[in-house]
Amino acid sequence: MQAEAGTNRRAFLTRALAGTAIPAAAQEKNRRMKITRVEPILTGSDVFLKIETDAGITGYGDAANHFLPYAAEGTLKDLIPYLIGEDPERVEHLWQVCFRRRFMRGGPATGTAISAIDMALWDIKGKACGVPVYQLLGGLARTRVRLYGHVSGNTAAEAARQAKERVARGLTAIRFRAFHSYDAVDLHDHKLAVDQQIEYLAAIREAVGSEVDIILECHGRYDPEWAIELARRAELYRPFMIEDPIRHENPQAMALVRAQTRLPLAIGERYHNKWEFRETVVNSYVNYLRPDVCHCGGISEMRKIAAFAEVFYLNLIPHNNAGALGTAATLHAALALSNVVMIEAPWANSDAQTDVVSPYPSIEKGYALPLEGPGLGVSFDEKLARSRPFRRPALQPRLNAPDGSVRDF
């Protein structure tokens, strides 16, 4: 009886399905895209990535790493064979392929290359669906993203003047780094640098008043005892946070600084995947994590870093020194992640001019508004990009201590 019932059911399904063939148009719609071409594009001082598909949809990623541009390009070329013929909408799968199918993993070149690939894949997926990338990430966790701008200057007075100008533009948070006059002579002395940073901090605080947040950037230059001294002297001026007070190679050393200051701390722009954030997160060495979407593994990896941080009640302030393409990816991630506080916005310091990629996000009262086009919401001018020869970015200052020993930039 059971065998007969099974035969009858199969016969019924065969007859029922005989007249329900999938229309050709629907079959074409359901056919998966394939990646047909992947190409790094070096232009000006930037490295970009173009991914083409057989559906005529093209995605772009930002692989700008001004410290290792040729390494980023070379790693991208190494990864191309892992992408050709694959479905570009399998973003997570291809992230894993590019990271785990290679025996040597991690580091800045791999982080930058995978970031660009991931960015371009999300761009393709958004364009294929006709929606902004943030919609694919769960939609808007916030309707706008707070920004912070930069000031520099070789004197405290110049830094204070710039800070007032940034505030007049509507920014409510300012980051500064002193040292510039010493950089010009390739010198870093811990005591001189602490003195100068406190001088700048005092001048900026006086210039902008008590309502503007000031971020004290250290660029990883100090040994722990000098970072502690800086934090002690800075408390009077109430900085929003101290960024990268010490080098990043040994996160445990941050415990010394954490134990000696009440000021919020931040680190992370030189970490290249979730695993490199692990020790800092589980030990709560800092208050804010600073992944860079162009270096940490892209939008996909930033989401995982944010989720990991959320478990420990830590927030993100993503690092961003990219142009319009990397900025767009940063913004889409920040719009969709619940624990982002603000993002770095060098384009907000002045009337930013777009170039190969456009536009920059619109700014309203110190906040970036969403980019609304499909994918990352930016356009890429290939003709302009290909017309410009690549020039390696200038070397950074070669800093030494007064005795001639190497110091950190």
Image (spheres, grey):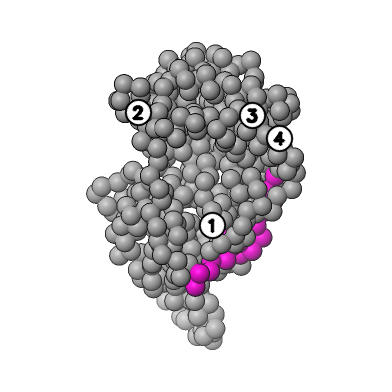
- Residue type (three-letter) at the residue carrying disc 1: Leu
Q: CA distance from mark 4 to mark 3?
A: 11 Å
Which residue is depicted at the point 68% across and 40% down? 166
Circles 3 and 2, Cβ within 8 Å, touching? The answer is no
Specify the label residue 400 is tagged with. Answer: 2
Relative to the observer, which residue lies in front, 227 or 139? 227
Relative to the observer, which residue lies in front, 10 or 226? 226
Residue tagged 3: 157
Which quadrant is the N terminus positioned in? Answer: bottom left
Which residue is depicted at the point 38% across and 44% down? 395
**Mark in the foreground, 4 or 3:** 3
Q: CA distance from mark 1 to mark 2?
A: 35 Å
Residue tagged 1: 325
- Residue at the left extreme of this rendering: 103
- Residue at the front extreme of this rendering: 185
- Residue type (three-letter) at the residue carrying disc 3: Ala
Which label's residue is closer to the chain start, 3 or 1? 3
Does the magenta segment cover residue 109?
A: no
As helix, strand or loop, the secondary structure at mark 3 comes to helix
Q: Residues within 10 Å of mark 2 (few under 14, many from 20)?
A: some
Residue tagged 4: 164
As helix, strand or loop, the secondary structure at mark 4 comes to helix
- Residue 169 as seen in the image, left or right of residue 187: right
**Mark in the foreground, 3 or 1:** 3
**Mark in the foreground, 1 or 2:** 2
- Residue type (three-letter) at the residue carrying disc 4: Lys
Q: Which residues are magenta?
A: 367-384
Camera sees residue 263: no
